[in-house]
Image: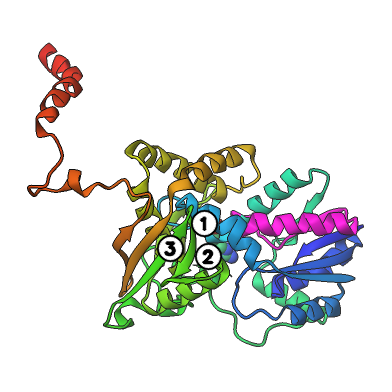
Amino acid sequence: MKIVLAYSGGLDTSVAIKWLKEKYNSEVVTLTLEVGQGEKDLKAIEEKAKKIGAVKTYSIDAREEFVEDYVFPAIKANALYEGKYPVSTAIARPLIAKWMVAIAEKEGADAVAHGSTGKGNDQVRFDVSVMALNPLLKIVAPMREWKLTRDDSIEYAKKHGIPVPATKKSPYSTDENLWGRSCEAGILENPMNEPKEEAYGWTTAPEAAPDKAQYVTIDFEKGVPVKLDGKKMGGVELITRLNKIGGTHGIGRIDMIEDRLVGIKSREVYECPAADILLTAHKELERLVLTREENLFKEMIDAKWAQMAYFGLWYEPLKKDLDAFIEKTQEVVTGTVKIKLYKGKAAVAGRSSPKSLYDEGLATYNKSDKFDHRQAEGFIKIWGLPSMIAGKRK
Ligand code: ARG
């Protein structure tokens, strides 16, 4: 038997290498993906996996693919689960699953494995994505099957000569990629506890942020951010920079109660500076260039898109249908948005577009007004007719 394991280099997945070998008598191939978790020494992680007993190791810098095929669609969909969470952890899972399947097929493996527990959304996202991409592959989740506590893991690691990180583990469970940082557990489990500063890793507290506001301008082309402050750059660089700039100003902190797919309500703390800035800017540009009908209808499609991404249905056919609709709307989403960053808030300060539908002549309250006020009267009579008839019945 041969298993491809999604390997982060952390304690749990390190223990999993040994455990999969023992329990399934299998060869373990590890796969590590760089999606912007910060300084990640991929070579060192591969070395570690080999030392613990992996027969073969892969590591891939997938940041560009992540941004282009997962983050950009999320921007076009203004994706916020339950109106708040930019689905940052969620959208990296189908990418990791895609690579797990690709390596499993290349290696002729029988199964893939991941380190998710049985309580969260991530197990669903991994499993459902793998099921959709290659229904023949078995899926093994050691942490779910085995239900290890942290202490069990440490004990198992010590017994098997697996290096245990010397640093005291953070009291939180975290996950990071270019689109955001997730933090949960520990004292955050009491929803009334305000997160302590130690829960945050990317952002300055708004009250400690600079007293002077900073402006950034983002240029979009067909829904995709292509320039920052007038300078053309790739998505990875643009997002990395916005996370830095936004983080300095305390932008993108989110504290929420969230409805998990497995039925549990959980308290989550996110930091998503670039996502906050780009989603705010993109949405504002859409307000300028899409018609009223498009804007109102797209809100529903966007909400559904975010749910599907969150629920692990990335490869479900309906998700592609929604993408087709969204992609069509983005044809005119080209223009510039100016955002003001100040003490935790990313606020729109201006917007312009060659595709703008805004007509100052129609909007103005001064003399140059082109809007025919008399027409409003007849329009309202007919528009209000059903209400009037119903009113008379009383
Ligand atoms: N609740 C979020 C989600 O389901 C984040 C999960 C993050 N994982 C973690 N180990 N903290 O997308």
- Residues under labels 2 and 3: Cα distance? 18 Å
Which residue carries the number 1 mark?
87
**Which of the two marks, 1 or 3, is nearer to us in this view?**
3
Label 1 and label 3: CA atoms lie apart by: 23 Å
User: Seen from this angle, which residue lies furthest left?
Assistant: 367
What is the spatial separation of the Cα atoms under label 2 and label 1, in whole angstroms? 8 Å
Sequence-wise, which precedes: disc 1 or disc 3? 1
Label 1 CB sits under 8 Å from any ligand 1 atom = yes
Name the residue type under label 3. Asp
Q: Residue at x 68, y 84 (%)?
A: 165
What element does badge 2 sit on?
loop
Disc 2 CB within 8 Å of nearest ligand 1 atom: no
Give me the disc on residue 179: 2
For label 3, the SS is strand
> Residue 122 bears which disc, if any?
none
The stretch in magenta equals 92-121
Mark 1 is on which residue type?
A: Val
Image point (62%, 47%), residue name: 314
**Sooner in the amino-acid sequence: mark 2 or mark 3:** 2
- Callout 2 amino acid: Trp
Local packing at callout 1 (Cα closer than 10 Å; few below 14, some 14-19, many 20+) is: many
The residue indicated by pointer 3 is: 219
Percent position of residue 394, x then y: 11, 14
In terms of sequence position, does the residue under pointer 2 or pointer 1 come before the other? 1
Q: Is residue 78 above or below residue 21?
A: above
Q: Is residue 61 above or below residue 267?
A: below
**Horizontal and vertical percent position of residue 21:** 88, 66
The crowding category of the residue bearing disc 2, from other C-alpha atoms within 10 Å (few below 14, some 14 to 19, many at least 20), is: many
Q: Residue at x 40, y 37 (%)?
A: 297
Q: Position of residue 278 (x, y in %)?
A: 43, 62
